[in-house]
Amino acid sequence: MQLHHGITVPASTDEVWRALGEIEDLAPCLPGAAVDHVDQDTVYGSMTVKVGPITVAYRGRAVIDERDDARHRMVVHATGREQRGVGTARATLVVEAHEQAPGTTEVDVDTDLTVTGRPAQFGRGVMADIGDRVITEFADRLSARLGATAAPSPGTSPEPGAAPKPEPEPASESTSEPVPAPQAGSDEPLDLGPILAPVLRRAALLALTALCVSALARLIRQRARARRRARG
């Protein structure tokens, strides 16, 4: 199936493109993803997906087949297989970045996706919704990462006319440990429950309707046979 997604990142095109090339550092930006290791243009890793109480883990690789830094365009081929099942996933992604406005970059992702196994039962609409969820969260995390990178350092000179900052007091002999800044991890699986819940409810309703129709048809047949026996 063919899918298209676009995201807007509040950073320059060069910054965004440089970040997209740092595959190993991007894993925390992609929900459910983890990188095992990188071998030149090949990335080995896993993706964990959760639907209610069920968790499905895929393991595979992604290969950057084409990369044009001047045009900010790359082509990626990814393949994966369920670790505890027979399902597979295969995708070709064409990623392009271009300046939308000064300091703002638009990233377009065109995906040719093929899946087998349990996820194949969901139609294109559901898969597109899943893609929207993943891309949106990826964009938010990437924007936060680039924003943290672009934050001014403590030694930045003040604006002209600004009041001088007071000199910091000498550090005390405190033994307290510094609190590390929270980081977006890739340990949490991609939770598809909110997206698939309506689909599962519709499936349950259809199954209940089919059961009622089957019971009604059986009751009608039984009454018809009873009437025939009464006439005979």
Image (cartoon, rainbow, N blue to C red):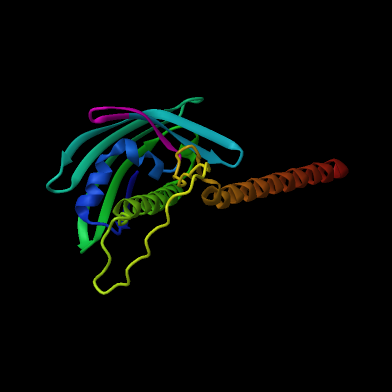
Residue found at the very far left of the displayed protein: 70
Question: Residue 145: where, in percent of width, then height?
Answer: 35, 50
In the image: residue 21, left or right of residue 87: left
Q: Quadrant of the N terminus?
A: top left
Q: Quadrant of residue 115?
A: top left
Q: Residue at x 67, y 47 (%)?
A: 208
Q: Is residue 163 magenta?
A: no
Q: Quadrant of residue 102?
A: bottom left
Question: Residue 70: where, in percent of width, then height?
Answer: 12, 47
- Towards the viewer: 218 or 196: 196
- Towards the viewer: 102 or 177: 177
In the image: residue 82, left or right of residue 79: right
Residue found at the very far bottom of the displayed protein: 161
- Residue 145's place in the image compared with 167, above or below, is above
Question: Residue 75: where, in percent of width, then height?
Answer: 22, 40
Q: Quadrant of the C terminus?
A: top right
Q: Which residues are magenta?
A: 32-43
Marks counted in the figure total 0
- Magenta segment's dominant SS is strand
Q: Residue at x 32, y 72 (%)?
A: 163
Question: Residue 97: where, in percent of width, then height?
Answer: 22, 52
In the image: residue 65, left or right of residue 118: left
- Residue 41's place in the image compared with 230, above or below, is above
Q: Is residue 39 magenta?
A: yes
- Towards the viewer: 220 or 194: 194
Residue found at the very far right of the displayed protein: 230
